[in-house]
């Protein structure tokens, strides 16, 4: 499988890891989280250890995504993201939110932030709304 994986693009590798994560989600949560984390690392410069625990890792993970050049709605200067990549990131994060909801609030929040970021950079409305819903759940949980 490693030989065949070398011929795949980063997006295709991410899709493969996401699908493996969904398959193992029912059987082994830890293995599923590992596959989803690996899928995220294919699409962003996200350190593998940044998906684990502590708020320090949350800060490192959020910084892995570059800030837009200018802040504001509809600005043409902001960094754009390919729609296919954004949709894959959104799908990965949506799967991770189900796993992280009960297990880890920080990772749950990070999943929402990544999905919101992908939606904003690509213009994908579903990713943006899903990210906002996740963040509203985080705020609701925190009181």
Image (tube, rainbow, N blue to C red):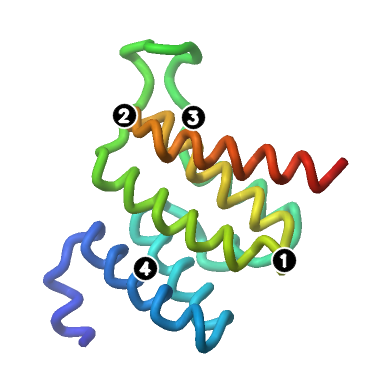
Q: Residues within 10 Å of mark 1 (few under 14, many from 20)?
A: few
Q: Earlier in the sequence, mark 4 or mark 2?
A: 4
Give the numbered dot on residue 18.
4
Residue toward you, 74 or 129: 129
Residue 89 percent location from the top left of the image? 39, 51
Q: Earlier in the sequence, mark 1 or mark 2?
A: 2
Give yes or no for contact between labels 1 and 2 (Cβ–Cβ under 8 Å).
no
Residue ID for mark 3: 67
Residue toward you, 83 or 60: 83
Q: Earlier in the sequence, mark 3 or mark 2?
A: 3
Q: Is residue 39 above or below residue 62?
A: below
**Considering the numbered disc 1 on the image, is that residue within a helix, a strand or a loop?**
helix
Give the numbered dot on residue 102.
1
Q: Earlier in the sequence, mark 1 or mark 3?
A: 3
In this picture, residue 41 sits left or right of residue 136: left
Q: Quadrant of the C terminus?
A: top right
Residue 27 percent location from the top left of the image? 51, 88
> How far is the residue under mark 1 from the one under mark 3?
29 Å
Residue toward you, 104 or 133: 133
Q: Quadrant of the N terminus?
A: bottom left
Which of the two marks, 1 or 2, is nearer to us in this view? 1
């Amino acid at each position: 499988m490693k030989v065949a994986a070398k011929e795949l693009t980063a997006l295709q590798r991410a899709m493969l890891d996401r699908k493996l994560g969904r398959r193992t989600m029912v059987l082994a949560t830890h293995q599923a989280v590992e596959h989803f984390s690996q899928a995220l690392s294919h699409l962003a410069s996200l350190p593998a250890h940044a998906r684990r625990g502590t708020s320090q890792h949350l800060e490192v993970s959020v910084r892995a995504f570059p800030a837009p050049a200018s802040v504001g709605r509809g600005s043409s200067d902001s960094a754009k993201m390919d729609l296919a990549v954004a949709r894959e990131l959104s799908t990965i994060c949506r799967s991770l939110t189900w796993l992280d909801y009960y297990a880890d609030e920080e990772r749950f929040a990070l999943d929402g932030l990544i999905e919101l970021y992908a939606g904003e950079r690509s213009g994908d409305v579903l990713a943006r709304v899903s990210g906002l819903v996740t963040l509203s759940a985080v705020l609701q949980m925190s009181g």
